[in-house]
Image (cartoon, helix red, strand yellow):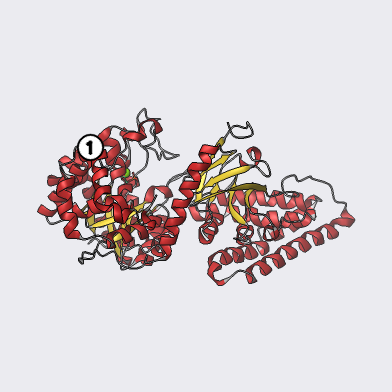
Amino acid sequence: MSNNNISEIRLSGIGGSPGICIGKAYLVDREGVEVIEKYHIGKKYLQREKNRFKAAVKKAMDELHVIIENTPEIYRQPASILETHVVLLKDKMLYEKTVETIEEEHVNAEWALRKVVASVKTIFRNMEDAYLKERVTDIVNVSDRILRNLAGAKQVDIEKIDKRVILVANDLSPAETSQINLERIKGFVTDRGGRSSHTSIIARTLEIPAVQGVDSATITIANDDLIIVDGTSGSVIVHPTKQTLVDFKARKAKYETHKVVLLKGSQLPAETFDGFHMPVMGNIELPDEVFSAIDHGGDGIGLYRTEFQYLSRRTFPGEEELFEKYKDVVKVMAPKPVIIRTLDINGDKAVANSSNSIERNPALGLRAIRYCLRHPDVFTTQLRAILRAASFGNVRILFPMISSNDELCEAKRILNQAADSLEKKGVAFNRDIEIGILIEVPSAVVMADVMAKEVDFFSIGTNDLIQYSFAIDRENRHVSHLYRPLHPAIIRMIKQVSDVAVDNGIKTFMCGEMAGDPLHIPILLGLGMDELSMNPQAIPVVKRMVRSLSIQDNQMFIKKVLKQTSATDTMKLVQDTYGDILSEKVFVE
Ligand code: PEP
Ligand code: MG
């Protein structure tokens, strides 16, 4: 129980923008937008009603122009979203259709607009393209703006809020978000929205924590409630206990420390002081995140988790849609490499239209490559898109969850077939790309010597390798204490994979979370990793750690590490040896 005998409530949503903020909630009013009444307009007042609608649109347009003009240069991306809104205001589907509806149905402007918006929303929602689907949010934002003007409701002027608060809203439009005064607004929570919404894009640009899609935020949270917003994990804590506050203040401090590091040296190469260069790359889930990887100094994309484009939709994306998305990422990153991982669906990322019934053990079920080999049509569509995108830059392909050489050979056969089909059709593509496998199932470690003959690189996925080696469900908090990357079993497996790779003249990368912790870097350098990939925010701190080390020292150090018999001992050894560096401000938790 908290100080006031009110229970702590934890809400979860989607982490729209990382970071933590703690403060009082400020509920954004939606008056005039939520409840719309229908009333009849007599023939002689129809023109007046149409004019009222036109005036509201004109006012909305003027408001947007003012916001655009006042948007600083650095937020040009959000401003272009607002320009989209200006275009939408004039769109025939919206504007003329509403005028027509007033005229034909003799209804008030609010009702007519609501009706038109509902049908436009249906059209967009049924679109194949995920990006266009997301534009429903823009249509809603634009119509809300007109409705506010029609109702004469005073728009909450976020810019004028004079308290240090966290906004809680049913939704925040990109325009509202771009009005946020960074000295006042600490972050925001919304019932609606998703990770790729424009609102979260702006939140990331502004670097304020945001959690979206919380569902019941505006119902559960009241004005002035003390709340914590953790945009990294996508959680919101209402009425936090003293202990939770202490925990989150510590986490916040850690995050802030990392942000300071981001500003310094993130674009410098990660080179040990005896001259070994370690490429440090970014993991991304959505195409737009490529910019975050670049901004944080990423030397490429070491893991593009492509399945996020398949989730939360009824139908799978087609080749053209995938190709365009992959091409964008590849072109932006070129000549730096982009490792595109083929679909890793099911497990904890079940697809909406998956035909298989609910699995008892999804992590051990028809996941990743298993799913793709069972559905060669889905797999081929993706492979063709990747091969086509490969002609625009430096692409490598990565097969997830390979547990036997048979699976690998079958995946390669389908890849070749996909290339042949493109060749036959005369479509531009690049067949000459490096192929790798994720080493994340223990059997792949054991069979690495066989599979090394078939691939150009290994990429170690420690998230799953730990899960499957120790029989720990990644999602289960009750066994999370067993989740220890520095356990000798994991370190020995990494060593085995790395040695096999050297013997066979191929490279070993790591893209699991283990790679993003500075504490692990002396070990990973000593184990001979050729590239590391991690969430973009971790890139600067890892680069900095590499720059504090010597490869020769690490090669000696690993001999000691390999003699340890527990994770705790290994951890202690790292702390004892590199404690001085790790206790520097930028590395402290
Ligand atoms: C891993 O398992 O370590 C990995 C990088 O993939 P994911 O986290 O997407 O399963
Ligand atoms: Mg994995």
In terms of depth relative to the viewer, which is nearer, 333 or 210? 210
| Dot 1 beta carbon under 8 Å from ligand 1 | no
User: In this rendering, does residue 171 appear at all?
Assistant: no
Q: Farthest residue toward the right? A: 44
Image quarter where ligand 1 lies: top left
List x then y, in percent, for residue 325: 41, 58
Query: Residue 282 occupies which quadrant of the picture?
Result: bottom left
Q: Which residue is mark 1?
A: 566
Q: Is residue 5 left or right of residue 312?
A: right
Image point (21%, 49%), residue name: 413
Position of residue 359 relative to residue 155, above or below, is above
In terms of depth relative to the viewer, which is nearer, 66 or 239? 239
Position of residue 155 relative to residue 404, above or below, is below
Q: Is residue 56 left or right of residue 545?
A: right
Query: Residue 296 occupies which quadrant of the picture?
Result: bottom left
Q: Is residue 495 left or right of residue 47?
A: left
User: In this rendering, does residue 353 appear at all?
Assistant: yes
List x then y, in percent, for residue 328: 40, 63
Image point (28%, 48%), residue name: 575
Q: Farthest residue toward the left? A: 503
Badge 1 element: loop
List x then y, in percent, for residue 416: 22, 53
Image point (32%, 53%), residue name: 582
In terms of depth relative to the viewer, which is nearer, 520 or 75? 520
Query: Residue 4 occupies which quadrant of the picture?
Result: top right
List x then y, in percent, for residue 156: 71, 55
What amino acid is at disc 1? Answer: Ser
